[in-house]
Amino acid sequence: MPTPQDHESLRRTDERRVLHPFSALHTQPGRDVLVVREAKGLVLTDDRGHQFIDAGSGLWCSNAGYGCAEIVRAAAAQMQAVSFSHNFSVMSSEPLIQLSERLVALAPPGFERVLYANGGSEANDTQVKLAWRYHIVRGKPAKKKIISRKGGYHGATVMAGSLTGLEVTHRGFHMPLDFVLHTEAAEYRRRPAAFDGDELAFSRYLADQLDCMIQAEGADTIAAFFAEPIMGSAGVILPPAGYFAEIQKVLARHDVLLVADEVITAFGRTGAWFASPGLDMQPDLITVAKGLTSGYFPMSACLVSRKVCEVLYAEEEADGMFGHGFTTAGHPVAAAVALANLDIIEREGLVAHSARTGAYLLEQLRQKLRGAAHLGEIRGKGLFAGIEFDAEPGARRPFAEPGRISGLLQQCLVEERVLLRSGHGRVVGAVAPPLIATPADVDEIVKRVARAVERFEERLPADLGA
Ligand SMILES: Cc1ncc(COP(=O)(O)O)c(C=O)c1O
């Protein structure tokens, strides 16, 4: 443990020495930092003794909650037994083998193997390589382009950041890569008026758009389609009725693989082990991270279907050498942590608890925020909820400067000592607490959020978006 330092000296060193991701760099001088000194359950305590309810689970990852002794013990024991072992070639470790068996058992039907990485972005990069390899081995090397969606978030590396359909990960970075295409987001709230009252027609329209894109590019050039079952970072956006069923018809017709990015949604977040089956999504590849270890240790994984494995394992070219891997991917300590984390989620029934408590959360949010003048929509599934604000909710007209308004909302939430994730390009407060949240925790979160929203609306300058 580092020696405790006073806040001002920590702040000054941070200001000089830490380059903060996803922050406006020029605003760092003079800016305060929230230095977390202790984390237990849902509560973070900073170096000045202020306590915050973390209703965003860090970055959507703390499914089992903070400070869980059982996970800490599993990590320490594994570190003592085998502090490092890789899994290149013939090397492996007991926790890794056991975890792989367990993940395949939890995964939707048709999945067979697990390939590890360290974070969600790395795993999505790896999925692209798996998709390329799949088509190359089948004699279709021109199938290289990848389609993802506007508003989707898949990470920030050169590849995953290109898949991300948000300007924030592209601007100033020579991105996106030129073989990545972005199709329309599955966002029914921002639909053209022609689809009012008919979600299925909107889904068919989106599938048609995708079909046109694939045909215009040439189906023989498209390798895979990436989608989050429910878009997280964009602001917890659920797909319209029938969306994935319609999209999959197009993908099947053009021999395009479907990658479900379940980095946020897996391991109970939406009230199910995986979100894709409940949305009629039958992916060929699934990406997991975050809730896999509840953030206690970096780990992510690509779940690979039998369909893809059968092709990869049939390759004889260059002895079938799969020239891919990362030193610390599949780390035995990460695997031991993941096993302990899954034990807790299973034993404590956190998946069903997330479904139940999530329903209560939605109901309470809807009740307590009902009168908010700028409230556009409250939506969600399990402990994964989004509260969206609009300049003119009746007309579903968004704020002209969502970044600035979102900043104001975040400020009001922090003043109430409740942390929520925000939405990119939208004014959204995303409520995704650790899955251990009790109904009493939900009541406290909703109370603080309601107070923050009241203050937000008071401060919202009258001319904004008007
Ligand atoms: C859906 C999704 N995919 C991928 C990622 C990237 O994960 P990481 O930040 O671990 O690289 C994230 C991160 O928020 C995510 O939400």
Image (tube, rainbow, N blue to C red):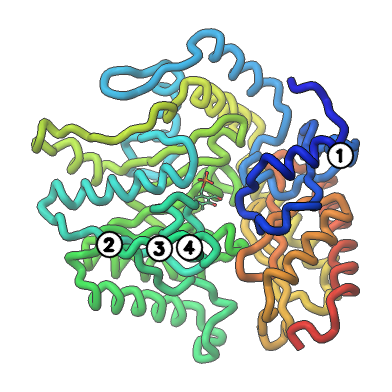
Sequence order check, earlier mark of 4 and 1: 1
Question: What is the quadrant of residue 377 in the picture?
Answer: bottom right
Q: Amino acid at mark 3?
A: Pro
x and y percentages locating residue 413 in the rendered image: 82, 58
Sequence order check, earlier mark of 2 and 3: 2
List the residue tagged with mark 1: 8
Sequence order check, earlier mark of 3 and 4: 4
Residue 277 in view of the camera: no
* Spatial separation of the CA atoms under disc 3 and disc 4: 6 Å
Q: Are marks 1 and 3 in contact (CB under 8 Å)?
A: no
The image's mark for residue 176 is 3
In front: label 1 or label 3: 1
Q: Are marks 2 and 3 in contact (CB under 8 Å)?
A: no
Q: Quadrant of the N terminus?
A: top right
Sequence order check, earlier mark of 2 and 1: 1
> Is label 3 in a helix, a strand or a loop?
loop
Q: Which sits in the foreground, 287 or 327? A: 327
List the residue tagged with mark 2: 145
Give the residue at x 54% y 28%. Answer: 338
